[in-house]
Image (cartoon, rainbow, N blue to C red):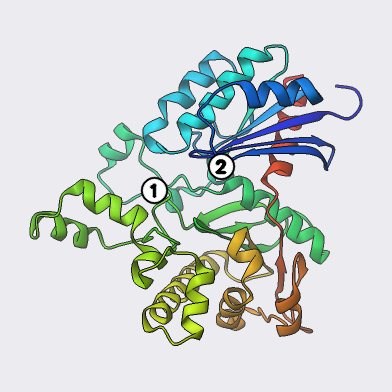
């Protein structure tokens, strides 16, 4: 395509819809609908107003077959729809967005950008669960990883903000929000991540437990008679910071309550902090060191105490965060003078990553 390629980004959440029009890196316009039931009107009206040469869709799960940004045809769409059971809250909505866009604008290529693609080249040792080999082969069991669009952008933007060479070095990317994950990135390739087959594995999160001893779950079900459905619902929606503090799981509320002497809130934050430090240490062991520590996501961008807690625990790897820069950071470097590893806050911009990948996919198709 000659000239700038205007990309409409479509980000369908479990119940919401975010639309954006990007001309280069400029956000021309955006539209957020907190409630979206799959109706075509918001996308159709946005397209009628602005037009676009490409439509880029964020999709959580690409399975084993969609491992890079891909122009959508009927076969790709059907395959993505078949993965709904792996991401039941998000996958059907994302496919609904694709279906609408292809119906109302069949002449505009739709490109799917999947969160799992960033982790598709995990080394076999990191991607493989130590389960019966026939299970792994029959059911496609592996660690898929998530938040890939956010990690991809944050790693690249973090290098830009600190003047490091893009695609080089040992980078720990921390996407910390209601859902949270870390990615260990070596010379541009993700070599380990905290989430696995589902987004339930890994870090303690707002309402999710993160990694839990599977024997404990079996004990609850078999020895105490807790229904499996209740166990897994609790792990996803009534655990994490919310489960420990007795609140909503919003870290801002937990920090406020902790400051006011609330014991449960203090425990919740300590467990959350320990989970971050423990998993960060594991990621650094895989990397063999640290050149760049990146924070992004709602908590990563807006909670200096969390960044300080992670940074102080990683002093052994050369991280050192300047307290004043940390307190006032919106986006930019927060490293202390002389730090052996750089630390940076990156504003989450999945829309920019969707647009970039969409342009590449259309150009490659030619």
Q: Is residue 36 above or below residue 346?
A: above
Task: Tell me the SS state at disc 2.
Answer: helix
Residue at image coords 22%, 46% = 229
Residue at image coords 74%, 38% = 30
Q: Quadrant of residue 3?
A: top right
Q: Is residue 336 left or right of residue 140?
A: right
* Place of residue 54 in the rendered image (x, y in percent of width and height, measured from the top left): 74, 25
Q: Within 10 Å of the Cα at label 1, are there few (<14), some (14-19), or many (20+) other Cα atoms?
A: some
**Quadrant containing the C terminus in the rendered view:** top right
Q: Is residue 323 left or right of residue 17?
A: right
Residue designated by label 1: 128
Q: Are marks 1 and 2 in contact (CB under 8 Å)?
A: no
> 356 and 138: which one is in front?
356
Is residue 289 in sight in this rendering? yes
Disc sitting over residue 236 in the figure: none
> N-terminal of the two: label 1 or label 2?
2
Distance in Å between CA atoms under marks 1 and 2: 18 Å
User: From this viewpoint, which residue is outermost toward the right?
Assistant: 3
Q: Quadrant of residue 73?
A: top right
* Place of residue 270 in the rendered image (x, y in percent of width and height, measured from the top left): 43, 79
Residue designated by label 2: 115
Residue at image coords 41%, 31% = 84
């Amino acid at each position: 395509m000659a000239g700038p390629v205007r990309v409409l980004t479509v980000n369908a959440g479990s119940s919401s819809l975010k639309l954006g029009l990007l001309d280069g890196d400029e956000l021309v316009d955006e539209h957020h609908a907190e409630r979206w039931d799959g109706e075509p009107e918001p996308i159709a009206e946005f397209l009628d107003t602005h037009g676009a040469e490409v439509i880029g869709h964020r999709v959580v799960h690409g399975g084993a077959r969609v491992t890079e940004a891909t122009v959508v045809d009927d076969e790709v769409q059907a395959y993505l729809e078949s993965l709904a059971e792996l991401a039941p809250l998000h996958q059907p909505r994302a496919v609904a967005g694709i279906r609408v866009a292809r119906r109302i604008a069949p002449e505009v290529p739709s490109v799917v950008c999947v969160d799992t693609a960033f982790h598709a080249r995990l080394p076999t040792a990191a991607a493989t669960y130590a389960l019966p080999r026939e299970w792994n082969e029959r059911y496609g069991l592996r660690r898929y990883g998530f938040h890939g669009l956010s990690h991809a952008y944050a790693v690249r933007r973090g290098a830009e903000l600190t003047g490091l060479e893009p695609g080089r070095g040992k980078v720990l990317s921390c996407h910390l929000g209601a859902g949270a994950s870390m990615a260990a990135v070596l010379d541009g390739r993700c070599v380990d991540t905290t989430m696995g087959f589902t987004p339930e594995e890994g870090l303690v999160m707002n309402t999710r437990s993160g990694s839990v001893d599977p024997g404990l779950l079996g004990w609850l079900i078999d020895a105490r008679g807790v229904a499996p459905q209740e166990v897994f619902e609790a792990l996803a929606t009534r655990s994490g910071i919310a489960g420990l503090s007795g609140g909503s799981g919003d870290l801002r509320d937990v920090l406020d309550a902790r400051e006011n002497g609330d014991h449960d809130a203090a425990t919740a934050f300590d467990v959350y902090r320990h989970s971050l430090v423990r998993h960060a240490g594991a990621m650094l062991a895989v990397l063999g060191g640290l050149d760049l520590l990146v924070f992004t996501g709602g908590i990563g961008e807006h909670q200096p105490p969390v960044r300080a807690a992670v940074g102080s625990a990683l002093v052994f790897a050369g991280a050192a965060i300047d307290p004043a820069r940390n307190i006032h950071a919106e986006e930019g470097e927060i490293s202390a003078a002389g730090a052996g590893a750089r630390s940076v806050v990156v504003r989450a911009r999945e829309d920019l990553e969707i647009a970039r990948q969409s342009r590449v996919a259309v150009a490659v198709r030619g």
